[in-house]
Image (cartoon, helix red, strand yellow):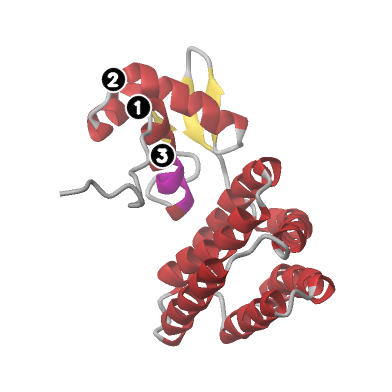
Amino acid sequence: MPVPTNHSKPVRRSAKENAYFQLEQWIIDGTLQPGEKLTDIELAQALNLSRTPIREALQLLEVVGFVKMYPGKATTVTEVFKEDIKDLLPALAVLQALAGELAVPNITEEQISRLEETNFRFAQAIKEKDSFNALKIDEEFHRIIIEAAQNPYITTMLSRLQSHVRRQFFHHSLELTEVSWKEHEEIIQAFKEKDAERLISLSKNNWIRSIEEMNAK
């Protein structure tokens, strides 16, 4: 039989990358708590890896601000300060708006369909008050837009910022609401109409509003 060539191919990651992404997720969702001491031996055993990729992953995590390494002493998970989100979200909002603007001429019908399907699942998670899943689906929604922007520099910067924002939401129990789902609907419509100006405004407001909701808590 002919071998299909258009199927999705698994992403191959190095041991260092596997360690990095798993440790990052554990730090974001609180599996590894702020202030917790990390040892490469224990992490290597937990991830069934050698100590070298663990050390390399920890060095990368220090660069992005998730761990602090004290040579010869200890490595600890950094603290999470709620006030930091006031600095994170405006920067994220501007970059997301730029990604949306760049995506307008590039986005495909298939990507728009994915946005609609993802937002449907997002609405379900909100209705079921599944905050953990809602946050992950929200990130998936915005990742499709970033993908359509086709700008690797924006992709890298947004990935780092979103990791910190996700950590804030998890640790401070900040919830996404039905308003976010409705804003997503408007964003999708702006893409269909190729209305870049409206898309910029919607994208910024979608993130900046979260600061107001956080202050109201």
Count of marks overlaid on the render: 3
**Contact between labelled residues 2 and 1, with CB atoms less than 8 Å apart:** yes
Identify the residue at image location x=77%, y=54%.
91
Dot label at residue 50 = 2
In which quadrant of the rendered view does residue 29 lie? bottom left
User: Mark 2 belongs to which amino acid?
Assistant: Ser
Dot label at residue 15 = 1
**Contact between labelled residues 1 and 3, with CB atoms less than 8 Å apart:** no
In which quadrant of the rendered view does residue 129 lie? bottom left
On the image, the x and y values in percent for residue 214 come to: 67, 72
On the image, the x and y values in percent for residue 160 come to: 61, 44
Q: Is residue 104 left or right of residue 65?
A: right
**Considering only order in the chain, which callout, 2 or 3, is on the residue closer to the N terminus?**
3
User: Mark 1 belongs to which amino acid?
Assistant: Ala
| Highlighted magenta segment, given as a residue range | 23-28
Let me know if residue 164 is in the magenta part. Answer: no
Is 73 in front, or is 211? 211
Question: In the current view of this chain or complex, which residue is farthest to the right?
Answer: 197
Residue at the spot of label 3: 23
**Considering only order in the chain, which callout, 1 or 3, is on the residue closer to the N terminus?**
1
User: Mark 3 belongs to which amino acid?
Assistant: Leu
